[in-house]
Amino acid sequence: MKKTMDMIKKIGLTAVFLFALSACATYKPDIQQGNAVAAEAISQLKQGMSKGEVKTLLGTPLLQDDFHQNRWDYIFYMSKAGQERERKDLILTFANNRLVNIKK
């Protein structure tokens, strides 16, 4: 009877220890950086749109280079726990304030 009680105590303590140990796992939230542009918004882009129309649709671009003022870069990064970092680029080129090229 004593051996049975000792065995039950050991099993119980082991279960409590394992349960407590599982609570020590680190939480890694998903991290989004940059412009999260919806595919629906990208599909609404049309050549000939003005910079103002594009900005209204997609928001302010992440990069606006002073040396390439006719190029807007929308860059998005997603980091998920245990996975490789995902990157999506949308590069828009303008001429005479009008959208002329869309590169995904």
Image: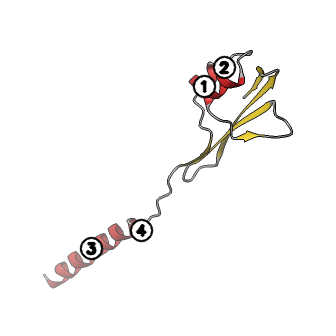
Give the residue type that dot 1 points to. Leu
Label 2 SS:
loop
Label located before the other in sequence (4 or 1): 4
| Foreground tag (2 vs 1) | 1
**Residue tagged by mark 3?**
11
Q: Would you say the residues marked 2 and 1 are in contact, meaning their CB atoms lie under 8 Å apart?
A: yes
**Residue tagged by mark 2?**
45
How many other residues sit within 10 Å of disc 3, few (<14), some (14-19) or many (≥20)?
few
Label located before the other in sequence (3 or 1): 3
Q: Residue at x 34, y 70 (%)?
A: 20
How many other residues sit within 10 Å of disc 2, few (<14), some (14-19) or many (≥20)?
some
How many other residues sit within 10 Å of disc 1, few (<14), some (14-19) or many (≥20)?
some
Q: Position of residue 66 (x, y in %)?
A: 82, 40
Label 4 SS:
loop
**Residue tagged by mark 4?**
24
Q: Residue at x 50, y 57 (%)?
A: 28
Give the Cα separation between the discs numbered 2 and 3: 63 Å
Give the residue type that dot 3 points to. Ile
- Image quadrant where residue 47 sits: top right
Give the Cα separation between the discs numbered 3 and 1: 61 Å
**Residue tagged by mark 1?**
57
In the image, residue 7 above or below residue 58: below
Between residue 91 and residue 31, name the one nearer to us: 91
In the image, residue 19 above or below residue 65: below
How many other residues sit within 10 Å of disc 4, few (<14), some (14-19) or many (≥20)?
few
80 left or right of 77? left
Give the residue type that dot 2 points to. Leu
Label located before the other in sequence (3 or 4): 3
| Foreground tag (2 vs 4) | 2
| Foreground tag (3 vs 1) | 1
